[in-house]
Image (cartoon, helix red, strand yellow):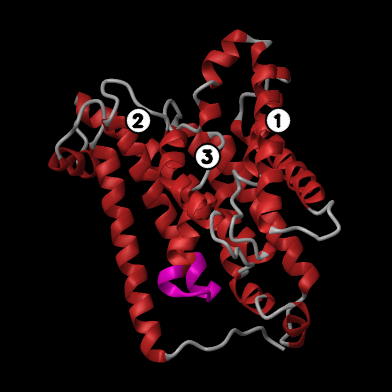
Amino acid sequence: MSVSSPPARRGRQVPLATGLVLALALLVAAALVSVAVGARSIPLPTVLDALTAPDGSTDHTVIREVRIPRTLLGIGVGACLGLAGALIQSLTRNPLADPGLLGISEGAAVGVTIAIALLGLTDPALYVWFAFAGAALASVLVYSIGTANRSGASPVRLALAGVAVGMVLLAVAQAILRIDTKTYDKMRFWLTGSLAAQTGDVLVRLAPFMIVGLVLGLLLARPHNGLALGEEAGRAVGVNVGWTRGLTALAVTLLCGSATAAAGPIWFVGLAVPHAVRAVVGADQRWLLPYTAVLAPVLLLAADVAGRVIALPGEVQVGIMAAFLGAPVFILLARRRRLVAL
C-alpha cells in the first residue's frame, strides 16, 4: 500500500506551487545580491556581464573565482542545514530540533578537525567522511543523554543535552587545533561558521554528498507524513517505520556532515526556517521540505551579506550572524509555557 498524506485541497495546491516559484525567485535575488555585495560592491550589470561575457577584468575575476563559489556554497550549506532541521523536527517531534542545537554539527566539526589537524587530510572528499562519523556519533550521544531520564526525551531536555555536548565537542576541536598553530590560524574562522576563504574545489568535492542528502531527504516527505499520524497509524497506511528512521538518519548525516565540512558549525538555520515555513504552508511534508530547502539558503545568504556589510572592510562570520538572526526564534519557542511535540 502506498503512503499518502491527507490530500490538500486543489485550491490550496495552486497557491502553494506559486509560492514555491516565488521562493525560488527570492533565492535567485539573494544569490545576485551575495555576488554583488562585499568589501567592494560591484554593480549588478557588471555581475551579469561576468556571468555571460567575462572579459578577464578584476571585477569579473573576483566575481567568477571568489563570489560565485562562495554564493553557491552558501546555497548548498543553507539548503542542507534547513532540510536537516526539518527532517529532525519531523522524526523526533521536537520543535527545538536543529543540527547545531543537538550537537550534530559540532560532532561533524570534531571529525573534520581530527582529519585535518591530526591526520593531515586536506582533501574535502576525504575529511567529509570523518564529518559523517562525527555527526552520527554526536547524534547517538545526545539522544542517549537526553533520554536517560525515566520520563523520556522532552524537547527542552534534548536541546539542553545537545547544547552541552556541542560545547564540549567544540572545546575538544579547539584543543586539538592548539597543537598545530598553523592549522588553527586557517581553521579558527571555520569553527565559528564561515563561507569565506573557501575555494571552488570545496564545493565541487562536497556537492555530490549534498545532492544525495537533499534528494534523499525530499523523497522522505510522504513517509514522514505517515509517521505524523503515529507509528501504528503510519504502519497501517504503509510506512516502514524502521526504514524511514534509518533513511532519515542517513539523510541528516549526509546533510549535516557535508554542510559542516564545507562551512563549519552553523546554528539556528535548521530551527528558524522550518518553523517559519510551517506557519505558512502547514505541516504537510511534501510542501514543508522543498520550501525549507529553498528558503534556508536565503536566510544564510542574507546573514552572510549582512556580515560583510556591517564590519567593512572586514566581515563578521556567517555563523555568528545566523545565530544573531535565529536565536530569538529559539528563545520564543523555549519560553512557551506548554512546549508540545510537533
Chain-order first, disc 3 or disc 2: 2
Q: Start and end of the magenta stretch?
A: 279-289
What amino acid type is highlighted by mark number 2?
Val
**In the displayed structure image, the side of residue 47 where residue 99 appears, left or right:** right
**Residue 166 image-quadrant placement:** top right
Chain-order first, disc 1 or disc 2: 2
Q: Position of residue 173 (x, y in %)?
A: 67, 24
Which residue is label 2 attached to? Answer: 66
Circle 2 packing at 10 Å, graded few (<14), some (14-19), many (20+), is some
Residue 281 forms part of the magenta stretch: yes
Q: Residue at x 46, y 52 (%)?
A: 329
Q: Position of residue 188 (x, y in %)?
A: 53, 20
Q: Which mark is residue 266?
A: 3
Q: Residue at x 71, y 37 (%)?
A: 165
The residue nearer to you, when weighing 85 against 340, is 340
What amino acid type is highlighted by mark number 3?
Ile
Q: Which mark is residue 324?
A: none
From the image, give the main secondary structure of the stretch colored magenta: helix
Residue 11 forms part of the magenta stretch: no
Is residue 288 placed above or below 182 in the rendered structure?
below
- Element marked by disc 2: helix
Which one is in front in this view, the residue at disc 1 or the one at disc 2? 1
| Quadrant into which the C terminus falls | bottom right
Which residue is label 1 attached to? Answer: 168
Q: Residue at x 62, y 41 (%)?
A: 105
